[in-house]
Amino acid sequence: MSIQLNQINLLAAITAEIDRQHPGTGVEARRFNAIIKAANDICAEFAKPVVKASPGMVIAAWLASDDTGLSSKFMASALTGEFKAENHYPRDPADFGRCLRLVNAVPGLAEKIGDMSQHGKHWAVVAAHWDEWVEVYRLGDSDRLYRLMQACYEGGE
């Protein structure tokens, strides 16, 4: 879904915030041009449709989606070997959700979750608790999932 923003209102809001932080200083032309550029960039980005991970995607399509994060990129890297990414693990339910949507989107990855345990103690915890975390995630109880994730990481179990 794309969102059309009013550029003039956005410019006014940005300049009002600058004036709130630095009353009476005004905005020089060079700086106002930077505000215009930023507002144009924001409007253009919001005008683009959001691309979510969806079943049947190949890794390249998933990487081009708006549904990636550091931990899910590392997971995709480790499970496919198609590219390299720095080792990050899911630290909260939002991170875990992106990992889950990756696994649901790209065929063949679900069967490889156990392979993540070889990528460090945090990933070993993720692999060991994957099914349980998926169940809690699907219930929509992010507070419970966050507490569960933290307890598992702290216990190293």
Image (cartoon, rainbow, N blue to C red):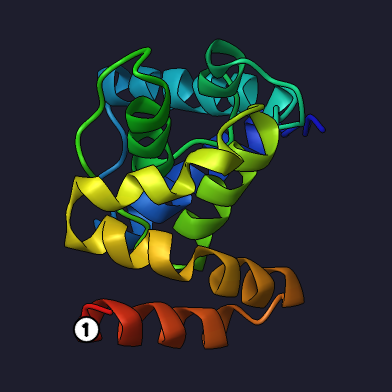
Q: Nearer the viewer, residue 58 or 22?
A: 58
SS class of the residue under badge 1? helix
- Amino acid carrying mark 1 in the image: Glu
Q: Nearer the viewer, residue 67 or 58?
A: 58
Where 51 sits versus 114, above or below? above
Horizontal side of residue 130 vs 89, given as left or right: right
Q: Where is residue 73 in the image (x, y as percent from the top left)?
A: 39, 33
Q: Which residue is drawn at 57% across and 41% down?
A: 111
Q: Where is residue 127 in the image (x, y as percent from the top left)?
A: 40, 59
| Residue labelled with disc 1 | 154
Q: Residue at x 72, y 34 (%)?
A: 5
Q: Which residue is drawn at 73% across and 69% down?
A: 138
Q: Which residue is drawn at 45% across and 79% down?
A: 146
Horizontal side of residue 124 vs 94, given as left or right: left
Query: Which image quadrant is residue 61 in?
Result: top right
Where 34 sits versus 126, above or below? above
Horizontal side of residue 89 vs 48, given as left or right: left
Q: Nearer the viewer, residue 123 or 140?
A: 123
Query: Which image quadrant is residue 54 in?
Result: top right
Q: Where is residue 117 in the image (x, y as percent from the top left)?
A: 29, 53
Q: How many marks?
A: 1
Q: Can residue 23 be seen in this view?
A: no
Query: Which image quadrant is residue 133 in?
Result: bottom right
Q: In which quarter of the image is the N terminus?
A: top right
